[in-house]
Structures are given as structure tokens and as C-alpha cells.
Amino acid sequence: MSGRRRFLAMLGTGAAGLAAMTASSCAQTAPAVTTRRRQNIMSADVLVVGGGVAGIGAAVAAAKSGADTLLIENYGFFGGVASWSIGMCMNQMRPGGVPRGYIHELLFEKLSKYGDQAVRVSTHQFFCNVEYLKVAFLDMLDEAGCRYLVHLRAVDALMEGGRVTGVVVATKSGLAEIRAKVVIDCTGDADIAFFSGADTMTETGKISPQTLQLNLANVEQADPEDLKAIASKAVGMYPHVPAGWGSDGWGMRQVSNCHHYYLNHAGTRDLGNFDVTDPVQFSRAECLSRRQVVEMTEAIRKLGTGDLRNAEIVNAATQIGVRESRRVKGLYVITEKDALEGRRFDDAIAWRSGYMDIGFTRVSEMRIHQVPYRSILPEKVDGLLTAGRCISATHEAASAGKSMGNCIATGHAAGIAAALAAKDGVMPRDIAVKRIRDVLVADRVDLNRGGEQQSKGMAM
């Protein structure tokens, strides 16, 4: 059974509430349905599905490597959570203050040309004003010569035998097809892998919580101790607010050179365990989070001291930020042990730094560890690569690599591999890993990293 048919079957059995709501209309005579023939609207050597930071890394790398590359994105802008989190820092962009490679530094270059309003750099983070960030991503794509389309949602995979040959997309003109020699799944939720029938993994009972970021204004200074006290007092007074975490309760930090603050928090952790690949659970998590944002703002205004009493909500993110969901089952599954011990691999094409952070539930020190090429290749399906947080990893190991700098790194490698496979007319699994590594080294990626203990400053 294909991934899409499995999804429809699941929707029919797992969303009984939705069926009950429409039972009365089903009893009426159904109107005639006209089936529209799907048009093949475009083709490319490399198709990147999902324009978050992993997709940006993959698309720029593939185009730079000479492949005719097309990037498609569901929203009207690129960057994924980096852009819709309304100012949350991009972690692991320069671990230890050291440049990480061509793609990471290209983003910094494009942001910097807009001045200090656009970006400021901390220990390893980029703090960005997201409106500049969205344009900087366009600048990167344009320089690389990558084609791109927004407002397209991939809804199925095109298959020839066991090979992915493109995707079906939903557009304002109906369903359409985009074909490619190689497809890279950067959806975050392994959508294309799932639609293709590739094996995927989801630990549905212990998924990291989702968080809807918010911006607050009219605050000159925020005392962490005050935020900790507010978080403690608000639980019980407001039904949806999350309990605090760590030393500051709710994490409040300034957006790049701006008078706004973004608020990071435990999100849905105390409200339930939501699998965003289930449409009913995704909807519930999203709507509960909207109520949560308003309640948190009201708690800050009523329970805070000083400037916090004057806080005003400016904005909330486009959607909840998803830390973990469905992942591809690859030729190798990265484990918690790999992350904690800083494992190295002969076929390494990236490395991941930071802490193993299971979304406001558990934070563990880890070592810099490498990502093998086998972990971005589906175990069975051909013509497909993955990058970002949906690569092959266990629940714990997925939390070790979800930082944006790490996602860009796997996207960078996947883009190079896809371009080489498309040029040679072979499957990605048939590419000699040394060729990918040679291009990465030329792009200033240090593939010797791995095994090092990290400083406490790399935690967030």
C-alpha cells in the first residue's frame, strides 16, 4: 500500500470524529465529481521539497554543483521555523565561533549586507530579524541559480517501480506533477518518504512538544527571576500555560537589534503528546497553542513586575514549531549512544553539535558526532534523499540534531549527492561517498570533526 493510500486509510479510521461531523451531509445525494487530469507543470534535475533551512542548504548546494534545481515550499516564504519563529536564534551556526562551511557563511554574508538590523552573532547562534532573513534566503537561491516556487504543497510521490521520480503538488489550479531525476525530502516530517512507501519511524508516545513562539513589545528589560516566578504562579490560574523550565521559567530574549522579545517555552508538553502527522492531533495542538499564547501574555501582564506589566503581544508564529515527528528509516539509524560518545563514520558527510535536547523534558551533554551518508538514504526506496530533522535517527538522536545549523549541514551534503547522481544518471546510493566528501571539503566543511567534548556554552 502506498504512503498516500495508507494516510487515507488512517484518516478514515483514526479521525472518526471528523466522519461523524459530516454524516448528515453524506446521506444526501452526492454531486457528480469531475476528475481533472494532472498537468506536468515543471521538471528538474534535482527537486527539493520543503524550503526550511535544510531545504535551503540542499537547494543551494545542488544548484552550485551544476544541477538544474527546483525548490518548492508550502508557505509564501522560505526558512521554515527559522522564519516563522519570529526571532528565535538559529543555533549551531558557528560552533565555538568557528565558521562551519560555505552554506552557513553564505547566509551570514547575505544577512550582513542589510546591516545590524538583520543579524547579530552570539557564541554559536545567529539572532535574526526574520523579515531580513526571508529575503536573505532569496538572495542565496538567486546567487546559486536555483529556481523556486512557493505556495505548493506536496501531497503524493510519483513512483516508477521502487524509484521516486517526482511529486504531486496541490496548487490553486488543482493537482499537478513535478518530475525530477532526484528528489530530496526536506519536509521535516518525511512526507515524501512516507508517500513513496519508504519505511519511516515515529515514537508516538514520547514525541518532543511543539511550541508556538510569540513576540512581546513595550518591554525595556526582563528579569529572568521574574519570568520564573510568573511561570510558577500561572500554572493553575490559566489552563493552557506550560510550567517553567530551567532558571528562567519561560525563555525571553531580544530579537536582533529590535524592541521586540521572543518567548520560547515548553509549549504543548503539559497538554498532551501530539503527532503532527495525524491531522486531528496536529489541528488540536495548533489550536490549543493559540489559546496558550494569549494566556501566557495575560499572565505576564498580570503577574509580572516592572516593564513586564506593560507587555503587549505583537505577533505569534505562522504555525507551531515542530521539534520531532516522522523520520525516514535509512540504511543506518543514528542512536543516542552515537551522539553521547561522539561517534565517527567512514562515510561521514556532516557532523552535529550542541546538546541532546528533548524539548523541555530532558537535556543531556553530548559530543560532536558525525552523520553517515547511509542516514540520509532511505533503506529501500531509490531516487530519494533526506535532510534536516527527518533523517534516519532514533527519538533521542533526532533531538541531538534538530538545531538549524545541523539541519543545514545535512542539506548541504544531500544537495551535492543529488547533483552528482543526476549528472551521472545513477541512484544516490550508487554515488561514491568520497566524491561527496571532496566537494564538501572544497566548500570549507571540516569532516574531521567528531568526538570532541563541547563547552557548556553550546547547550542552547
Image (cartoon, rainbow, N blue to C red):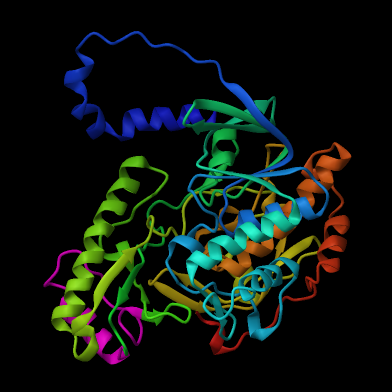
Indicate left or right for 336 with 218 as reference: right
Q: Residue furthest left?
A: 237
Count of number-bearing discs? 0
Res. 448 image quadrant: bottom right
Indicate left or right for 272 with 304 as reference: right
The answer to which of 412 and 208 lies nearer the viewer is: 412
Q: Is residue 244 above or below residue 18?
A: below
Q: Is residue 96 above or below residue 312?
A: below
Res. 85 image quadrant: bottom left
Please identify the dominant SS of the magenta region.
Answer: loop
What segment is highlighted magenta in the picture?
Answer: 222-251
Asked whether residue 402 appears in the rendered view, the answer is no
> Does the segment drawn in magenta span residue 189?
no
Report the residue at 37% width, 61% height from top: 317
The answer to which of 302 and 108 lies nearer the viewer is: 108
Report the residue at 50% width, 59% height from top: 395
Q: Is residue 411 above or below residue 76?
A: below
Residue 357, percent from left and from top: 48, 72
Residue 58, percent from left and from top: 69, 54
Residue 48, percent from left and from top: 65, 45
Report the residue at 59% width, 34% height from top: 196
Report the residue at 28% width, 78% height from top: 244
Indicate left or right for 447 with 367 as reference: right
> Does the segment drawn in magenta span residue 239?
yes
Residue 337, percent from left and from top: 60, 69
Q: Is residue 28 above or below residue 61?
A: above
Asked whether residue 145 appears in the rendered view, the answer is yes
Indicate left or right for 227 with 210 as reference: left
